[in-house]
Image (cartoon, helix red, strand yellow):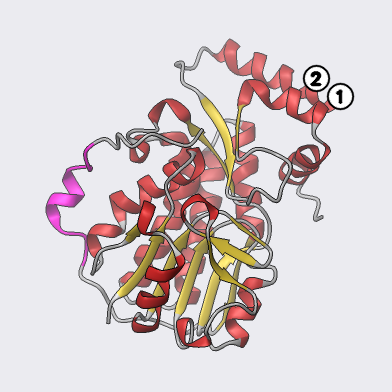
Amino acid sequence: MAAAEAFQRYQEAKKAEGRPSSKPTLVNLSTRAKTYPNAVPLDEIPKQLEENPEFFELMKRIVTKEKS
Amino acid sequence: MPTTVLIADFDLPTRSASGFLVRWIVPRLEPIPLYAFLARRKPFQFSAPQSDIIIGMGHGDKDVFTGQDEVVILEVSKYDPKEVQEKVIKLLSCQAGMVLGPDLILNGAEAFLGYVDDYVWVMDADLASTPWSDKMAATSLMPVIDGLNALLDGKTAGEAYQIELDGYLKNAEIEEDELIKSCLEFNYDNAVLLGDREARIRRRPPLPLPFRMIPPPPILVPLRR
């Protein structure tokens, strides 16, 4: 929950910067064996963080650089 | 000696990465790339043994690398060593550096460049028909392209690996977006080079002038999702 809220704050900060609109999407090249999608639009990341523990772990590794 | 370049293109991440390979690498190479519907096991089995370098981009896991629609191209213990012997292999794919990469080296590959965790980046889904113009994706994917071009210029695997790493660091230093910066640092941390750092392949001609100036036409093939 805290991670999802933190990500929402990040998105609000990006919107406040007034960058030109586009559809930024976090993507990866993992196989279907993983439970998380290969493409997650940034506005859907908070939802994925709350609902998908494997995606939460991936984001944790990306942000904190902790090895799995 | 020909090049084996296998490029999946069926969803957003493969479209994004394939765009950079089609824009900057494919015009340097002979013969026809194993692109989209050709990115399958049979064409790979035919092409790989004749090549000195294998460049692959598709979804992957610890022990497997896949092509179009995730058909298996290379899986631990399920390929002929002749497909990889004495070759420099670069796989832009998730986690293949964990088990598959060491297995390729055990079976005679000269050098392997890949990643030990997911390969992640931020792309602009609105640019799926012209993926090479995506500046967000370029921060992560251009270091890969620069490393590949170094290999094709005749530099060693070690030099090409370092060029890719330096690219991530340089882009991370100037990147203002925290998520994109984290992705760059993540890919930097997880890039690996296995085997002979001094391995090199036959030098390929540089990108012909027209291709340096003019991007490919938009890709109109629809994506799976």
Q: Using the rendered image of the protein, determine whether residue B155 is visible from the camera's viewpoint.
A: no
Which chain letter matches label 1?
A
- Residue at screen point 55% across, 30% down: A25
Instruction: State the residue position of label 1.
Output: A2
Q: Which residues are magenta?
A: B206-217
- Residue at screen point 53% across, 51% down: B168
Residue placed most toward the observer, B93 or B38: B38
Residue B214 drawn above or below residue B192: above
In the rendered image, residue B194, in percent from the top left (x then y), is placed at 60, 77
In the rendered image, residue B125, in percent from the top left (x then y), is placed at 46, 29
Residue B170 is inside the magenta segment: no
* Residue type highlighted by circle 2: Glu
Residue A10: quarter of image? top right
Residue B43 drawn above or below residue B104: above
- Residue at screen point 60% across, 51% down: B119
Dot 1: element: helix
Residue A15 drawn above or below residue B197: above
Neighbours of disc 2 within 10 Å: few (<14), some (14-19), many (20+): some
**Contact check, label 2 and label 1, Cβ < 8 Å:** yes
In the rendered image, residue B15, in percent from the top left (x then y), is placed at 42, 42
Q: Which mark is residue B37?
A: none
Instruction: State the residue position of label 2.
Output: A5
**Quick one: which residue is furthest to the front in this view?**
B42
Marks 2 and 1, how far apart at CA: 5 Å
Which chain letter matches label 2?
A
- Residue at screen point 29% across, 49% down: B23
Q: Using the rendered image of the protein, determine whether residue B161 is visible from the camera's viewpoint.
A: yes
- Say left or right for B88 vs B107: left
**Quick one: which residue is furthest to the left in this view?**
B210
